[in-house]
Amino acid sequence: MNKAQLIDAMAAGSGLTKADAKKALNAFLSTTTNALKGGDRVAMIGFGTFSVSKRSSRTGRNPQTGKEIKIPAKKVVKFKAGADLAGAVS
């Protein structure tokens, strides 16, 4: 499902217009992004939790040459599914 299909499904499921569903989705994405940038976590009971984790630097290998390369440290976004979502998928 891509963003346009998600907007269509949200509009159909909520009775909102497509324009309003798009605004709601964009607001959710923007708010979540800003919270994660600020170091917060976003938890939705039953659905899941978005959080930021630090990945330390490490040594890797270039698959073409086999030469060792240094992979720098960075922050990554993690998502942990909630019990309701995990149960619905399995």
Image (spheres, rainbow, N blue to C red):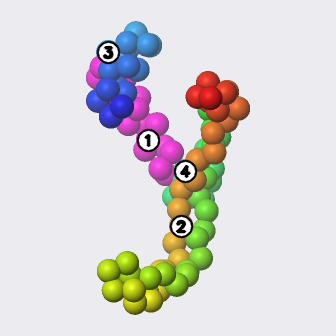
Point out the tag, 1 or 4, that comes first from the N-terminus: 1
Please name the residue that numbered disc 2 is placed on: 75
What is the number of the mark on residue 29?
Answer: 1
The spot of residue 53 in percent (x, y) is 61, 62
Please name the residue that numbered disc 3 is placed on: 17
Q: Which residue is drawn at the image coordinates 53% and 77% (left, top)?
A: 73
Q: Secondary structure at mark 4?
A: helix
The spot of residue 79 in percent (x, y) is 58, 47
Q: Nearer the viewer, residue 19 or 2?
A: 2
The spot of residue 29 in percent (x, y) is 44, 41
Q: Quadrant of residue 69?
A: bottom left
Q: Are marks 2 and 1 in contact (CB under 8 Å)?
A: no
Q: Nearer the viewer, mark 2 or mark 4?
A: 2
Residue 26 inside the magenta-drawn segment:
yes
Point out the tag, 4 or 3, that comes first from the N-terminus: 3
Q: Quadrant of residue 64?
A: bottom left
Quarter placement of the C terminus: top right
Q: Secondary structure at mark 1?
A: helix
Point out the tag, 2 or 4, that comes first from the N-terminus: 4
Mark 4 closeness class: few <14, some 14–19, many ≥20 residues within 10 Å: some
What residue type is disc 3 on?
Thr
